[in-house]
Image (cartoon, rainbow, N blue to C red):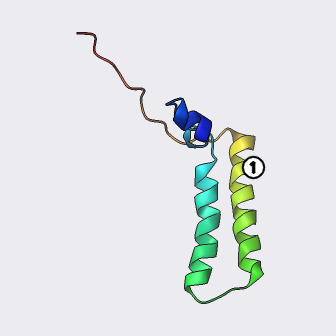
Amino acid sequence: MLRDVLLREVPIVLRSELYAVPAVAGASVVAIAHAAGSDRAAYALVGAALCLGIRLIGMRYGVTVPTAPEDRRLDR
C-alpha cells in the first residue's frame, strides 16, 4: 500500500476487488462486541470467518465494488 501511495496510484486494496469491504465487516463484528463489553475470542473468530467468507464469495462469483471514474485531465 505504501508503494502505491508513493507512486501516486490508487492502492490495490481500494481497487475493484473485495479487500477493504470484508476487512471492515470483520472488524465491525469485533468492534461491536468490544463496545458491548465482551472480550471473548469467539467474536474474533466470527469476524475473521465473516471476512474470509465475504472475500471467498467475491472471488468465486466475481463480485467487485464500484470504482470511481478515472481523473479526466483537460488539455488546455
Check disc 1 and report its element: helix, strand or loop.
Answer: helix
| Residue 32 rendering spot, x and y as whole percentages | 57, 78
Pick the front one: 3 or 56: 3
Instruction: Look at label 1 and name its amino acid.
Output: Leu
Seen as rendered, the residue at the extreme left is 76
Q: Residue at x 58, y 53 (%)?
A: 21
- The part of the image, by quadrant, that contains residue 24 is bottom right
- The residue tagged 1 is 56
Residue 1: tell me if it is visible.
no
Pick the front one: 62 or 1: 1
Q: Residue at x 41, y 29 (%)?
A: 69
Seen as rendered, the residue at the extreme bottom is 37
| Residue 40 rendering spot, x and y as whole percentages | 73, 85
| Residue 50 rendering spot, x and y as whole percentages | 70, 63
- Classify 7 as above or below 34: above
Residue 30: tell me if it is visible.
yes
Left or right side of 5 for 55: right
Image quarter hosting the N terminus? top right
